[in-house]
Amino acid sequence: MDMKIVVLTGAGISAESGLGTFRDSDGLWERFKIEEVATPEAWAKNPKLVLEFYNERRRQCLKAKPNSAHNALVELEKHFEVSIVTQNIDDLHERAGSKNVLHLHGEILKAKTSELSTEYYDIKSDIKLGDKGTDGKQLRPHVVWFGEAVPMLDKAIELTTQADVFIVIGTSLNVYPAASLLHYTSEKCITYIVDKEKNNALPASYKHLKANATVGVKKLVEELIKRK
């Protein structure tokens, strides 16, 4: 049976494609207040500002291209059963060629009309006030805001419990419930962390590759394939 690998990715893997991270010293949350652009309350108070914030994220996403870290994970998929669980709302994994991608926090190139929507609209242009779905309601980005449920979490947990190898790439592991996935790995699961900063809160058993995603992921993938 193929070894099952689950990869949890965060903003760090897309940073080298030119997409801004959120929590670094120059990240988006240094320039924008979460409560003003990324909560249901913000949407109710000032939907125009929220739309502008995510319209800019969408424009940046469309300009960005997958980097060598995204491409390395595609190569990994040729040798193992790989599932990617991403906190990112961009589509760089898909554009690189990854087949099994689960978006925990939604997708910037899709829109919906409410938190609980199951109907999504592919969108590559700005969303404006007055743009409506088939239910007659205002379109909003298909993203999970702070304070909203994470509907794909149960599926992510299911994948994690089955993993032989769990790889964390470019995430501070400060955002819950995504960070809680580490607690669902089995005792036999081998865990790797690829990040330029060492997280001292993690157990020593976690293998840390202190590197940017483009360097660390390629190195790890080559190592795993050699061991096959």
Image (tube, helix red, strand yellow):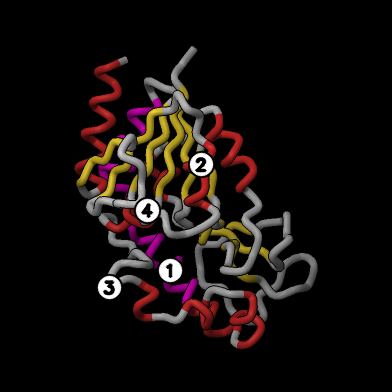
Magenta-drawn stretch contains 58: yes
Q: CA distance from mark 2 to mark 3?
A: 30 Å
> Which residue lies at the image location 35% right of the left edge and 42% below the top edge?
203
Q: Which residue is mark 3?
A: 26
Is residue 120 rendered magenta in the image?
A: no
Camera-nearest label, 1 or 2: 2
Label located before the other in sequence (4 or 2): 4
Of badges 3 and 1, nearer the viewer stands 3
Instruction: Write the residue at 47% across / 48% down.
Output: 86
Is the residue marked by circle 3 packed among few (<14), some (14-19), or many (20+) residues within 10 Å?
Answer: few
The mark that comes first in sequence, 4 or 1, is: 1
x%, y% of residue 31?
36, 80
Of labels 4 and 3, earlier in sequence is 3
For the residues labelled 3 and 1, say whether their Cβ atoms are less than 8 Å apart: no
* Number of the front mark, 4 or 2: 2
Q: Which mark is residue 125?
A: none
Dot placed on the residue nearer the N-terminal end, 2 or 3: 3
Residue at mark 4 to residue at mark 3: CA–CA distance: 15 Å
Image disc number at residue 183: 2
Say if mark 2 contacts mark 3, CB within 8 Å.
no
Residue farthest to the top?
1
Are the residues flagged by discs 4 and 3 in contact, CB closer than 8 Å?
Answer: no
Callout 1: SS:
helix
Q: Amino acid at mark 3?
A: Asp
Count all numbered tags in the image, as a single digit.
4
Residue 2 sits above or below residue 12 on the image:
above
Count residues near mark 1 (Cα–Cα under 10 Å), then give few for <14, some for 14-19, many for 20+.
some
